[in-house]
Image (tube, coloured by chain):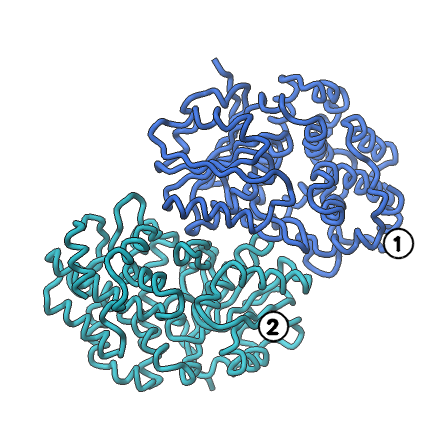
Chain colours: A blue, B cyan
Amino acid sequence: MIKTTSLNVELGDRSYPIYIGEGLLQKKNCLDQHIKGKQVLIVTNETIAPLYLDNLIAILANDQTVKILVLPDGEKYKNLESIDKIYDALLENNFNRTATLIALGGGVIGDMVGFAAATYQRGVNFIQVPTTLLSQVDSSVGGKTGVNHRLGKNMIGAFYQPECVLIDVNVLETLEDRELSAGIAEVIKYGAICDNDFFDWLEINMSKLLGREKSALKFAIKTSCEKKAEVVEKDERESGIRATLNFGHTFGHAIEASMGYGIWLHGEGVAVGMCMAASLSNKLGTLTEQESNRITGLCEKAKLPIKKPGQMNEVDFMKYMRVDKKNTSDKIKFILLNGIGVAYITDDVSTKMLSNTINGV
Amino acid sequence: MIKTTSLNVELGDRSYPIYIGEGLLQKKNCLDQHIKGKQVLIVTNETIAPLYLDNLIAILANDQTVKILVLPDGEKYKNLESIDKIYDALLENNFNRTATLIALGGGVIGDMVGFAAATYQRGVNFIQVPTTLLSQVDSSVGGKTGVNHRLGKNMIGAFYQPECVLIDVNVLETLEDRELSAGIAEVIKYGAICDNDFFDWLEINMSKLLGREKSALKFAIKTSCEKKAEVVEKDERESGIRATLNFGHTFGHAIEASMGYGIWLHGEGVAVGMCMAASLSNKLGTLTEQESNRITGLCEKAKLPIKKPGQMNEVDFMKYMRVDKKNTSDKIKFILLNGIGVAYITDDVSTKMLSNTINGV
């Protein structure tokens, strides 16, 4: 008996369930109701394919035509060329509008498969089977899909919701330590921006997460997905509150892009970015020094970096932060904290204060 | 005083007006209300730029930052590489989510700019300024955007509606005869699938359209846009009736793709495709021989091709028709006629009958 927790993302006719449990990739036919046609393309990467591809194929209905595309692993392959490979696989197999794409992998695979699904024949169904903690708690939920451009991260994309998200926490057993910590960065983010109690819980239970205790992981994943779903339900297309989910990402994206995608993991950039945003909040007087230290401390406990890369200076940060998607004028938008658990958006930050923040972290 | 007819495409919060008139590209500020930010990228092609680009720039508000991208002209450039050039132009100029893209050109430009707008930063606004009859009566209305893939036409794309469509019939003065006829093919299509009276009118007034009489052109454009808007309002994402707009396109796309995009114009392929669909309808007993001849006759009157390319055989047609987006199983879907003015969708066509049709036209 496999126990499944499920929660729903409520978006009218684009609503979908998130299933969370141990061993879901052993549960025959659990995806059947979300696959309307007879054509399935599973897209995964070279790291995940040997681990979980057979399991996924085995739980699909026997009358499906199942094709496989294995892409190279890594953020540097998150580009239009990889999307073109997905189109090729679909077209070479004569896949039609009733086809379903399944993303088996981390955030890179999920974002790309979602975008390919959004744009193949003007839209086909897709399912997320996230295999990293980061994609389980963040990127697989909410419908942001897309790829990077040499001039900026996630600059090409679409809002496109999956049919369902299947989260098997057992897959985290094979996740590298560094990837686990990177996922925890996004978990910390939810505590920081909207749930003080969850932040407290994380401070107490961080060692359990790092020790991969299933019940702690399930609680952290479920809480994170709930927080994300609440925000996405209020603001699917990010005209307001959804931007708060970008806490730590303004600085973080600059680190990722400047260092070259994949050198720093997304969650690692976000961790340093959260420390910077906390420091900036403190300078603006909306976060105490003690609270700012709690954020840095929790990231450190999660074995995440808390200092910017040595080779990056202010100019490097500014170059990338100027092209952030949140900006709607020449000013850079920041997500900052009004105490732990309360986020706000501002573009009213002086150059000097920004400079001090970047140089100070 | 420039007289403007306007009609609305009613799609809830995605509704937008179509403006039709003589000299609209001389009407200062007529687009202002549809441009929300201060960043405008006009995308056009090498043929249209010298003719109308200055006019378009001149009618925009003086406080806009206006950037220009001129792409090479032709269907063979309707691919992801051209889309990437649009992304480059947007990112190199630091264009943000409040940017507006304006498509100044025919269907190729309109489809590509729409797709770039749908996918840049997960969606920015765009405006259609169609400069060919074909794009005025068909592709600029309804939100189908996208590019071709080497394995099939319009296989990559999105449904994405513009903020408005600006149709200045004066631009048709510079349109090549062959392009004018190609546009008339889509006009004939509306008569054939849903308006018997309009079909009669076209039989009587074809010489006026070919003679570029403004009032005849305006009537034909307005009627075509109305017909298209009606269908799109009922079925924006083509789950049913919208497919009837593909009358003639199943065979037509095969001709275009097989000959190499741009060798045959889209409307030329559609014309032969309509003759084939009429012939097939006749074979199935839903269209009299006389009615089928009226369709062929009207295409001929419009100086459109009515016979398939000599070098194409049945195998060539089948290869491309199998990957048609309308198909949802192994069977090919056809849009056929139940008398002039009434279309229906079927996949119940025997191989023999299809073979006879292809070989007979």
Q: In the figure, B87 relative to A4: above or below?
A: below
| Nearer to us in this view, B280 or B294 | B280
Place of residue B266 in the rendered image (x, y in percent of width and height, measured from the top left): 35, 68
Q: Which residue is drawn at 55% across and 40% down?
A: A71
Q: Residue furthest top?
A: A1
Place of residue A303 in the rendered image (x, y in percent of width and height, measured from the top left): 78, 28
| Nearer to us in this view, B314 or B281 | B314
Q: Which residue is drawn at 40% across and 46% down?
A: A92
Query: Residue B68 — which label?
Result: 2
Query: Residue B8 — which label?
Result: none
Taking the image as shown, residue B97 lies to the left or right of residue B265, namely right
Residue B313 in sight: yes
Asked if both marks, 2 and 1, belong to the same chain, the answer given is: no
| Nearer to us in this view, B233 or B240 | B240
Using the image, name the chain to which the residue with label 2 belongs: B
Using the image, name the chain to which the residue with label 1 belongs: A
| Nearer to us in this view, A240 or B178 | B178
Element under disc 1: helix
Place of residue B144 in the rendered image (x, y in percent of width and height, measured from the top left): 42, 59
Taking the image as shown, residue B5 lies to the left or right of residue A51, namely left
Q: Which amino acid does label 2 sit on?
A: Ile
How many numbered discs? 2
Query: Residue A352 — which label?
Result: 1
Residue A233 in sight: no
Quadrant of residue B90 within the rendered picture: bottom right
Crowding near the residue tagged with mark 1, few <14, some 14–19, many ≥20 C-alpha atoms within 10 Å: few
Taking the image as shown, residue B214 lies to the left or right of residue B92, namely left
Q: What residue type is labelled 1?
A: Lys
Q: In the figure, B218 relative to B116: above or below?
A: below
Q: How far apart are marks 2 and 1 (CA)?
A: 35 Å
**Quadrant in which the C terminus of chain B is drawn:** bottom left
Place of residue A173 in the rendered image (x, y in percent of width and height, measured from the top left): 62, 21
